[in-house]
Amino acid sequence: MRTLTILVTAVFFLLSTASAGSQPQFMFVPVPTTVELGTGSLPITRSFSLAITGFHDGRTDRGAQRFLVQLSRQTGMFLKPTASEPSKVTLLIHADHDSEPVQKVGEDESYDLTIGESLAKLHAANPLGILHGLQTFLQLVEITPGGFRVPSVTIKDQPRFAWRGLLIDVARHFIPLDVLKRNLDGMEAVKMNVLHLHLTDHEGFRVESKSYPKLHQVGSAGAYYTQAELRDLIAYARDRGIRLLPEFEMPGHSRAWFVAYPELASLPGPYSFQPGSGPDPVMDPTQDKTYKVLDKFLGEMSKLFPDAYVHIGGDEVSGEGWDKNPKIQEFIHSHGMKNNQDLQAYFNQRLQKIVNKHHKIMIGWDEVLHPDLPKNVVVESWRGQQSLAAAAKQGYSGLLSFGYYLDLMWPAARHYAVDPMADAAATLSPEEKNRIWGGEACMWGEWTTPENIDSRIWPRTAAIAERLWSPQEVRDVNSMYTRLDELSWRLEWLGLAHRAGKIHMLHRMAGVNDISALRTLADVVEPVKDYARMENLKGPWDNTAPLNRLVDAASPESDTARHFADLVQRYVQSGFRDPDAESAMRALLTAWQGNDDKLHPYLEHSFLLSELAPLSQNLSTVAAAGLKALGYLDKGEPSPESWRTQQLADIGRAKASVADLLLMVVAPVQRLVEASSLKSASASR
Amino acid sequence: MRTLTILVTAVFFLLSTASAGSQPQFMFVPVPTTVELGTGSLPITRSFSLAITGFHDGRTDRGAQRFLVQLSRQTGMFLKPTASEPSKVTLLIHADHDSEPVQKVGEDESYDLTIGESLAKLHAANPLGILHGLQTFLQLVEITPGGFRVPSVTIKDQPRFAWRGLLIDVARHFIPLDVLKRNLDGMEAVKMNVLHLHLTDHEGFRVESKSYPKLHQVGSAGAYYTQAELRDLIAYARDRGIRLLPEFEMPGHSRAWFVAYPELASLPGPYSFQPGSGPDPVMDPTQDKTYKVLDKFLGEMSKLFPDAYVHIGGDEVSGEGWDKNPKIQEFIHSHGMKNNQDLQAYFNQRLQKIVNKHHKIMIGWDEVLHPDLPKNVVVESWRGQQSLAAAAKQGYSGLLSFGYYLDLMWPAARHYAVDPMADAAATLSPEEKNRIWGGEACMWGEWTTPENIDSRIWPRTAAIAERLWSPQEVRDVNSMYTRLDELSWRLEWLGLAHRAGKIHMLHRMAGVNDISALRTLADVVEPVKDYARMENLKGPWDNTAPLNRLVDAASPESDTARHFADLVQRYVQSGFRDPDAESAMRALLTAWQGNDDKLHPYLEHSFLLSELAPLSQNLSTVAAAGLKALGYLDKGEPSPESWRTQQLADIGRAKASVADLLLMVVAPVQRLVEASSLKSASASR
């Protein structure tokens, strides 16, 4: 373990010495388990070729082909599409044997990658390791004065957790197949291995059912995946070493079921997709018909989805639908149950038997946890490590999704700090710890569209992917951000539009080609955090309302604001003596100060921009304060208290959200203004 | 005709009053034949719907569906995918009857579009007009303080020319199907109607042949379209009102034929794709076997491609291959021919009979023109209007491609000024003029890749599309550029990557996330013009060499340099008294002056950037001269002659190409430096 730490530290050292103009030495995300640096490097030229020895099949061949396409994108060289003779290749790939016909949790994903000056060797037990190793190789390719190269290294790598998932909610807003596919490409790049599709919820039933066709015909509001499309997606995922986990929400979050089949509900319908309409939609667990339908439906889905697991949701049952049905209350009473929780446990027990009958293992959210449930049920915790640890202690295996909710618009660093083994989980016995399988980044869909979803997922999900793959010791936030910044533009090569989508949306909002001033504002704001946007809503949330405002386009995390805060930090820490940081801050503050004048004419011409007027004004005001504070610090003259009081009042107001957006440069400017009270060190120059 | 001109002028007036912050009133490209402005506008809301009355079929339905998807992209609103009842729709579409089963040259493409405050009506004789009218509607959608709207207008529109083509050379560098498709989407947006695929050339045979499978197996070097893919592409094009014209080059430009079947060549093989290898590759027109093969091959292709025309190339036969074969020279002699030209005419006559036998009409480049050829052969002129007019006088129909070569890296304005009816063609009789069917933008493929081809085609091709559609009077260059700038970002919504591709390439070259300084340089350069890049080559041109330098990424036309030149023009014309222009120039010049210092560290770290060092230095030097000149003009003090002489010498040097790139801001700076000799008007302030 000590060697590992030393090696990992070496990687960080290299990373942290990277600066503008020099290529960061390693752009791994996630950081491999061990990396030993050699001397020299392997040139990547037009004659690059690879060969596969040992086990290979269509999947490894396609993986190698995809690798060559990506290497070609990274270098701009036309590479030969066919594998060459083993004797004269650049990259020699060897897998010992095939992987499981259906990818299993905990299957061997390790690989060894050895790069010499004329040959690279990738070895793995099975194709899963090969796929991961190829991604590591791609992350090693760098441009140098002498051409494209891969440094000589020896890497031994394996995941820390067996379950590294991304949940995409395709129910609240439908996400087309091509968008899912490009996100699978992104997942492959960072070695994630489960795509969890939240296929049903109040707003829509997104899977074709042949046994209950009204589910997709009526329950989808027109947008669903056919079974052929899903089979294609499953094959696409498998090609990338990724399992596809389907989720069908029940007994709550299930209005879409009842729009199609109201007879399954606890209260009489009709049910519709009209926001806020109809009674509390929850299944009636007291009637046999419900189980008959679920049996047939889950039987069908169990054939469609090959994965060993099926997620049945099971969260957030309000109970209102059960409270209001006297027949159901009578059932609870007559069966000796204490409350609705017991009724849900009863439902889950019967459901679990159905799931097992179809040779699947059931997963559910925290709420499914109940002493009556068998131990092979897996719990996915949105409540935290405490809940996860409690489950592990009771013998249940579990996954962490708490702390990984991408829709809350947290910075990557905050997700990165969340460890499934931390807090309560840290105190578990080794055996109990083994029951914690990993976690899932969750892209809930209240505010996502095909246009902006990539920007909500990437690059932040890569930080979670690293948390779940790399050794627990890998936790340096600066290193993570350096690598995330570099990964981000590389991910766009895969077709992901987390950067490009924003530009398209800004053009739409402004209606003109010149969006420079709008972009300056957009680059320093972030959507409000947690559930604030939902709380700010005037009426009921409506999934058919347009998502075309700046809050929909803005990145969850402002890179510009983060870099500005870093500059302020550097400047303050230097005792106000870092001239590079100062001039960089000045350039940014000057641009921001003048931006409102530039942006103003555009704001007046577009109904999508007019709400931004106070925000734009705040940016200019705050920037002016920052510049003035720098002026005082520069002169070494403390700023007058009355001035500071005034500025801090303005700054306080500028911290409030406008148009569901936060101005992320306010806090670092506040730091400058506060610091200007000091007789600064630069006075002694 | 007078009314027309007045109306068109009115459109221009509106366009030219558009300024920063206000939306240009009409973003048409191409400008419609007549536009009458009404009062008021039609709101585009979430409840937008359309209905099709009169004739409709799968194509109109898919066209309407595509329209809704695009309208949804333009507004960010979720629109219902299904057409509504005619009684309560926003847009009512009516086609009188079907169009031809195979789209014909000169088929009615006209449409009428009337937009009222609560209803828009689109009427056309057939679906072709409907498709065009839908694009016009999309170009009318604008964002306003009150929401998305379409102004009340009455438009009657029809094309000036029946043939508005784009040639894409997929032989020199293979272009994948998805790239062709997104370019078809772009063509639809600007009402072009022919995609001409240059399918064969020395570097590759890009179509699957079942009769001669070695053509694609051996002659494609691994990259070709299957017949199924081509059928799919043809259907995709037809859905967009676009014909697909195949070109098979013969008897020259045909090495790929001989790599597969050397027995067709005039000189003994073997032939290979090795650059500069083998004898002059030209078909042997004296042997019957050649015609037997062509008969069978063209028979197969005539079934695959439904269009009435087939392009047989026929250009640039050097004659060397024929000169060196005594049997061929003997054939010329014994058949009473004078020279190789006569032999080519003999070949074309026999070829024409084969083409006719398969119920197709033959098209060839200028060189096919020979008195012995029947009049139904169509001539495509790469030599100019003179050649086109000569053909028309002889009774041949013709197309202009001269002046529309996109690979020459000309500015849009230069293409825009080329009119098929100008020069020699202007003096033709009305009957002869009718033989000039239109023209084709030509994307020759020496320097194209799937990554940069969009940026070579768009937006410049839209200027050619307008030349071929709009009334001849529509020729205001400023208006064209205003509209092209706006069209350009809208085109990216179709998936075209003419802007995004450049960013990806710059990231690759720099190998880092921060490409701001590189982008500043990249935005003010253009690739060298005409055939200079080919002439600069040290060795033979090689289509397998990487295309990953800045010359491959840079736009053919620098928007930034054009805007800067406009500012200089405004400033000089104002007698040096336009403070807005001056401050805008200063901001640009200041950024350029400081850019070399910023860029320098990056140049040293990448073999793809190192060649740019002198170019980057030139930019800073020239910008410094411009700033100094502005300083003199500002003070109203003539610049010293010695200073000017020195600067003009530097400027002269900076005009030379570096790394196959031209610095496009040099000429406008020269203008400033020269103007600084005057005692400027601002002195009298």
Image: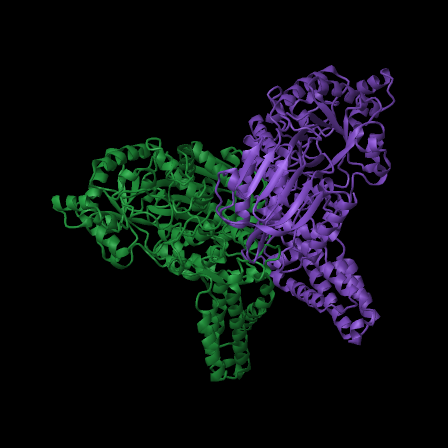
Chain colours: A green, B purple
Q: Position of residue B426 (x, y in %)?
A: 84, 38
State the quadrant of the C terminus of chain B. Answer: bottom right
Q: Position of residue A498 (x, y in %)?
A: 49, 51
Q: Which residue shows up at 60% across the image and 51% down it? A: B41
Q: Is residue B607 above or below residue B369?
A: below
Q: Is residue A79 above or below residue A399?
A: above
Residue B266, quarter of the rendered image:
top right
Q: Is residue B467 left or right of residue A191?
A: right
Residue B183 visible, this angle: no
Q: Is residue A593 above or below residue B167?
A: below
Q: B492 or A341: which is nearer to us?
A: A341
Q: Position of residue B336 (x, y in %)?
A: 87, 17
State the quadrant of the N terminus of chain B. Answer: top right
Image label count? 0
Q: Position of residue A373 (x, y in %)?
A: 19, 44
Residue B341, quarter of the rendered image:
top right
Q: Point out the residue furthest to the front here.
A: B87
Q: B35 or B673: which is nearer to us?
A: B35
Residue B121, quarter of the rendered image:
top right
Q: Is residue A673 left or right of residue B151?
A: left
Residue A613 visible, this angle: yes
Q: B59 or B591: which is nearer to us?
A: B59
